[in-house]
Amino acid sequence: MEKQAQSQQRSVVTVSQLNRDARVTIEQRFNQVWVTGELSNFARPRSGHWYFTLKDNNAQVRCAMFANRNLRVSMQPSDGQQVLIRGRVSLYENRGDFQIIVDQMEPAGEGALRQAFDALKLKLASEGLFATEHKQPIPQRPESAVIVSSASGAALQDVLAVWRRRYPRLRVTLIPTAVQGVEAEAQILAALAAAERLQPDVVLLTRGGGSLEDLWCFNLESVARAIYALAVPTVAAIGHEIDVTIADFVADLRAPTPSAAAELMVPDAEDLADQVDARYRQMRNLMRGQLRHRALLLHNTALQLVSPQTHIQQNWQRLDDTRRRLGAATHNSLNNRNTQLDKVESRLRLLGPGPRMQLAHQQLATVHQQLHIRWQQTLNQYQTRLANLVRMLEGVSPLPTLARGYAIVRNAEGQVIESADALTAGERISAQLAEGAVTATVDNIDPSASLQPGS
């Protein structure tokens, strides 16, 4: 009875179920990773997919980069190269192989700054320097402000022009500092310390746009910790709207441009405008919180789903494996038959000439014919299975549909648009084509228009 109870309590799964559950768990934990290492065992089969091993001195990991991704790689990969890859960690269910599905590859040196940025961002985020609960509120009607910026930069003039127009009563103090180069770090740290001693209502740290190298002083850990330690509310407006630095994450408020920061920091009118602005920020923060919550729910739900792309990628690998096994089986079969023929010929030579040799030749011809028929039948069977697999892949792939001129249209949140009613004029949309993608703005919407046959 005890053995029977223990047997009933066992949770038994198949190998397929185990590998599938392991793949889902791994993909949830490692949704996207950056990994650097040395290329080895690089293979490029006729399918166009890349299979290789990424290794360092102590370990290695299998990688697969499919044709729709490796077409965008500008470098020519080969064994021994040091590369930086981005991808998601997965499991090839058929063999239980731990692997990385790669979607980007570049020489290792080009990503050094981005790796340093991501590593510091992760470190400071884990310490809570970016946490919302540590953000100080920006005063609605500041009386004094300190600007930490270059005295000759256009960003300073943009900020002062906005403040003179919107809030001329604000008392402004400039602490000039270098905003790029080797001397920038020490000057910025000194300027932030001086700004805190002045005890203004708010501090603005700003500069104009530039490359990642130009903005690197605002990605330094010392500058980030100095901003975090300020007792004065701090606004960061570094570069253009697309530029994001560590200083932006640590600051109490991040503005996309210097002019936008100037507008965010002061009101445009007296009490009524201040009240309207406060209500607006309150509603905006509530909406952002709801959107982040909904986005998290959507992301968690999406992780539980198996995307068609995953099925296609798994089938691509199965197809490559089947092709390799077919070639190996055919080669082994031919080698075995040739060995048998050699043995028959040796026995015939020992038996001598005459009728026995004639009979042996007839038997040899029969065996050769049977071998050819069996080999042809085997080859036809594998070719039929291969053709069926190709048709199955083409049936589930969206690429043939895209190649006929269709496109997948998504809104700014990445949702697929099925009806014109889901769009509004001026909204940004993106369209995935058979080759490449485009981004556009909706100028006109005609819900009554429909696709006619032959159009």
Image (cartoon, rainbow, N blue to C red):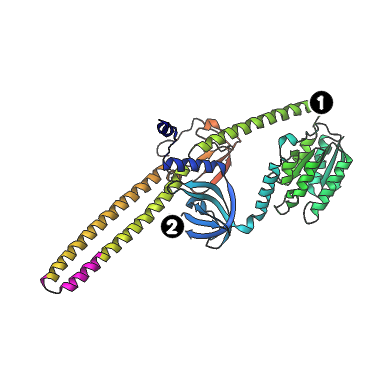
Q: Position of residue 290 (x, y in %)?
A: 64, 30
Left or right, 312 with respect to 271, comes to: left
Q: Are marks 2 and 1 in contact (CB under 8 Å)?
A: no
User: At x 87% / y 45%, what residue is drawn?
Assistant: 194
Q: Would residue 424 be seen by someone viewing this image from the given angle?
A: no
Is residue 351 one of those drawn in magenta?
yes
Which is nearer the eye, 171 or 387? 387
* Quarter of the rendering occupied by the C terminus: top left
Pick out the residue farthest to the bottom: 353
Task: Give the residue at x 78% y 35%.
Answer: 136
Magenta stretch: give its range. 340-355
Q: CA distance from mark 2 to mark 1?
A: 70 Å
Q: Main secondary structure of the magenta part?
A: helix
Q: Which mark is residue 271?
A: 1
Q: SS at mark 2?
A: loop
According to the picture, the residue beneath numbered tag 2 turns out to be 45
Residue 248 in view in this figure: yes
